[in-house]
Image (cartoon, grey):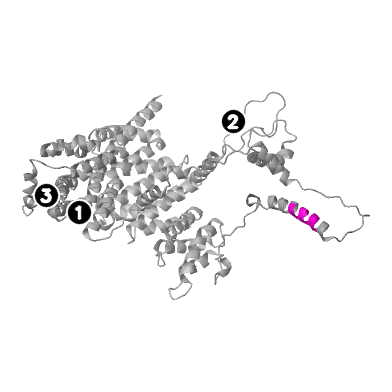
Amino acid sequence: PFLRDACLDILSSETIRDAFVDLLILSPLPNDDLTQQKLITRCVVELISSCQMGKECDSINEIDEDDDYEEVERGQEDNMKIVVGYKVLMKHVLEVCSIWNEIDFVNQTDRNQQSHISSFIIDAIDYMQQDNMHGNTLQQAAVQEMVVGVTNRLKVSDVKIRVDGMMVAEKIAPILGETLAFDELDAVRQRHSKRQDRPPIKQRYIPLPAARTKTQERSKKSKKKKTTVKIDPDEEYLSDESSTSSFDSGDFDNDSESCDSDWKEENLISYNLTDDEEDLRPFSKPVYLRECLDYLRASNEDDQAKYMHEVGLEEISKLVRASPPDLLDIAESLTVELLHVENKYNLDSFTKLRLEGLCSLAACAPIATIPCLQKEIFLDVAFEVRLEILEVMKYSAAELCGQRELEKHRLERASLPIVEQPKIMGKRSIVPHQLPNDIKDDVIGDVANVVKELKTRRWGRSRHPDRNITVSNRFGELSSLYFYPLIRGFAESKTREALWGGENGGRLLSRLIITLSTFVENSGNHPGTPILASDLLELSLSFYEAENPELRVSALVSIATCLPSLSHDVLARFTYEEKLPLRLSKTMRTDSNKDCRQLAKIILSSLSNISSVMLT
């Protein structure tokens, strides 16, 4: 309300409105705060849609001569204001979309600025859904410009720009009478649904129960005390109903109170109600990998084909990690089957289980699995399958070099409670008194198990024996098996336009270079690492000036990865003969991509540090 009262009179002028939109929507933003951007675009849309043009109403009427506003009755004055504001908004949306859809704007403008303009368009689309026939001409023109802009954005390899185009496309689809949903926006929709399902603040915090008073505590303790009655064995037994009934009733009441205290809900142990229904299946789980392969190849005519398909996918990763005797014999066939298997039964966890199986095979049987993956990536397979193969190879290299185990150890160590232990004067305690009770019980059990081992040693182990671990790098000796077949496959197929041409070809090549740089990094201190780094650096230098910005970023990342692993003579050759610093300086000054300029600057600074170390 404040902005409307302060700005609507000023925005009645078309010149001021144009300047207002140019300043807040089309001009570069001072910062990258997404919340502030969305707030600005929403306020601009609200203000423009509420505009009422006094003297400038004629300029809008010239756009659509069929609308005769002078014949509107006085009773329809409010509707008239809505129509006028709607047409003003559509006019500015059309102007913004005519700039937003240009291919030069898509390729050269900063990503945050493009997201800001896309947010303005998405907010304005909400007003297109009104049943307003007076602005159909402007709306149709704006929608046409949006369709062109979406098409140009879906051709770009930058993920953020593609997502902006997809969000606009999903927003205008209902206006065109269609339903559209991109799989890449599932994560965005899940976050939005979680925010909507979040309860209000008042419902999130439950007040604690009031503390019991001393009187209540005493009354509770008195109830728990069981009264006992002494019976003389020599006393004559009386069968009087009154006496026995009074005695039994009192005893029963006391027993019931004690029973009630023992059978409270918090004292009961809950049963495990989860059941995998394994006993109800008409077939058993596979024990060997060959059985998993048979389950995946089950015929559609079989009534249990869906369940066999699901069970086979679930058990592949577990069996592979157990290193069965038939792993090397069946690994290649199982890899090919997982690469080309289809989700014929619409299983929810199909993609996750399939990738887990491929990653387990590549990590546990790399000699049999990796050549098969390298062969498949250059055959006639889907583009997404090629990207999945590269990701599986990267995962395998990270696990073999010990990176996955280190990450798991760091997460476990970060989840442990941190307890500050002050210095103790005098006699030390095996278990610190400052620990909470639940943790102290666990610690006492652990101490009891190692007391015998530490009994004959004065100081025992260090205070933090499990803080650091050592892992062996098993990938170094296999790095050439991963690296050079991909280089050879690229050299043999680089003339294939269907494989390396267009936007998808640029994306695939950039992912390939990133994968090769990952191999160099994961090979560690192996003697063959400098050779891999030198060969990859030569390949990367031929692409760091490519037209595709994603490919340029990948080449610069690869250069930064290779430099620390080069030998001194090779680094000197690239520095002085290949003039690597001059090329990077040119990239830092003239490249149109912000990420490329920052990477070139970082590489130059690290290169100067390496050169100074070599000279000293």
Q: Distance between the residues labelled 1 and 3?
A: 38 Å
Looking at the image, tell me whether mark 3 or mark 2 is earlier in sequence order: 3
Count of numbered circles on the image: 3
Closer to the camera in the image, 608 or 574: 608
Residue type marked 1: Val
Query: How packed is label 2: few (under 14 Cα within 10 Å), some, or many (20 or more)?
Result: few
- The residue identified by callout 3 is 74
Up-down relation of residue 124 to residue 589 (above or below): below
Q: Is 315 placed left or right of 151 in the picture? A: right
- Residues drawn in magenta: 245-253
Is residue 247 part of the magenta span, yes or no?
Answer: yes
Residue found farthest to the bottom: 301
Find residue 420 and name its label: 2
Residue type marked 2: Glu
Find residue 422 and name its label: none
Select label 1 or label 3 by which is in front.
Answer: 3
- The residue identified by callout 1 is 147
Disc 3, SS: helix
Disc 2, SS: loop
Q: Distance between the residues labelled 2 and 1?
A: 61 Å
Residue located at (47% from left, 41% from top): 526
Q: Distance between the residues labelled 3 and 2?
A: 77 Å
Query: How packed is label 3: few (under 14 Cα within 10 Å), some, or many (20 or more)?
Result: few
Select label 3 or label 2 by which is in front.
Answer: 3
Q: Quadrant of residue 215?
A: top right
Look at the magenta stretch and give its main secondary structure. Answer: helix
Q: Is 534 placed left or right of 426 in the picture? A: left
Looking at the image, tell me whether mark 2 or mark 1 is earlier in sequence order: 1
Residue located at (10% from left, 52% from top): 73
Closer to the camera in the image, 577 or 589: 589
